[in-house]
Amino acid sequence: MTKINDLFGKEVAVINLGLASMAKSVSDQNVKVFDLDWQPPRDGTPRLHRTKSGINIDEANQEVVDRIKRGQAVLIGMGLAKDVIPGMHKRMILHAGPPIEWKRMCGPTRGAVMGALIYEGLAKDEQEAEKLAASGEIEYSPCHHHHAVGPMAGVVSPSMPVWILENKAFGNKAYCTLNEGLGKVLRYGGMGPEVYARLKWMETDLYPTLDRALGTLPNGIDIKSLIAQALHMGDECHNRNRAATSLFLRAISPALARTNQDNEVLAKVIEFIDRNDHFFLNLSMPAGKAMLEAAEGVPGSTIVTVMARNGTDFGMRLSSMPERWFTAPAGVVQGLYFPQYTEKDANPDIGDSTITETAGYGGMAMAAAPAITQFVGGTPQMAMQNTLEMYEITFAEHQNLTIPALDFRGTPLGIDVRKVMETGILPRINTGIAHKDPGVGMVGAGILRAPEKCFQDAFKAIQEM
């Protein structure tokens, strides 16, 4: 057989587009072989390299992920929503997900809105709250339209205290309420005296105590750094925040002690945070929002910067089209249910917490948190496989957020609509499950994938850019 080098009269190299075994006879002749990880586009999906206007898409996407990586999300303070959230007013209620009007809201969102109106003193009971909510006198707006995020129903009313995070690399801010804990809580649509009493205590005791402490920290608390540490301690910072909550409490405790005005109040604040392993969720979410929002507005990019659900619709936005929502019906969560509840009781997927997956942690980093499967279902092996699969649809890896079990490989970062369409792999999300009826609350937790229609519609829009 004529050798390849003899045939061409000089040293050559071969690129292999198939299986490694196909190139064995070539490599046996001491010829350099480069295996290219390649497959034909799915269903004839075109490979997009440039927009119609001539923008290099890869260069645009590189700019987006570079901005996300450079982001430095720092907790700088607190305030009441009506005082600090841009555009907020006394007759406005913010909610999770894309825009929606009252008549299309799901049960948990309705319950949360009604509960917020009672909490604000705008209604005395559920019947009065429901009437006011449907009257047209209340303005509803997505949290994402106000640089904010909210877990589950995501409801933010004017008097609620919120965290203020700043992206120190770019100067933009993001906002989120404080986490109430699990069980019957407002964000799951829970209503009742215990819900309102907890919210009032958070407003009158928890918020001032934390705010005074943060006021003595001139550099704030580096939330991105806590996320990075928590990934090394078994969290993924969406549905598992045990380590991150502990790290936060450790970071703020000296300031809490120095600014203490009442020992019993301080003890209750520390107990509340310590007993709520999800407390950090409401910090990891605005951290993701702050880092992603700085990456919006890059022409030609195919990177997703928002994924959010309102319990009726799933919505998605791209860096290159930051004002445009691509929507589809919210999916059904497959998961573990509390005793007495089943999938028949569950509301469809809901909440802004998918900002974590969008920012490169949460479901993207499940390999770092095998114990999460005890909460959402599945196995530790599934958690590992989930992260490995997500590398197939992301543009980059986050060198600042790493996974020990993968030899400290960076988490999958930058969901690329092109790759989703080419591979058929949809982003996987882990999430809580709310009861479909108003007033009940949380019934379980589980896993699902983002709906394909959002990516199909976004891909069509990209082809027209």
Image (spheres, grey):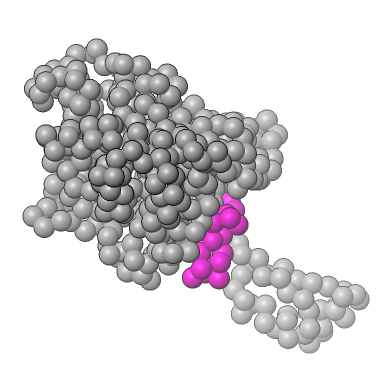
Is residue 423 or residue 230 the one in the foreground? 230
Q: Can you name the residue that lies furthest to the right here?
A: 9
| Residue shown at 45% from the left, 39% from the top | 214
Name the main secondary structure of what is drawn in magenta: strand
Q: Which residues are magenta?
A: 393-411
Left or right, residue 130 beside residue 136: left
Q: Nearer the viewer, residue 96 or 208?
A: 208
Left or right: 452 in relation to 61? left
Establish if 149 lies above or below 442.
above
**Can residue 114 be seen by looking at this rendering?**
yes
- Residue 385 percent coordinates (x, y): 43, 66
| The C terminus sits in image quarter | top right
Q: Tell me where residue 398 appears, x and y as whole percent.
A: 57, 54
Measured along the vertical axis of the image, is residue 297 above or below residue 31? above
Looking at the image, how many numbered discs can be counted on the residues?
A: 0
Please determine whether, in this image, residue 79 is positioned above or below residue 311: above
338 displayed left or right of 161? left
Residue 14 picture quarter: bottom right
**Relative to residue 290, is residue 236 depicted above or below?**
below
The quadrant of the rendering that contains the N terminus is bottom right
Residue for point 19% across, 14% down:
135
Q: Nearer the viewer, residue 185 or 356?
A: 185
In the visual, does 38 lie left or right of 54? Answer: left
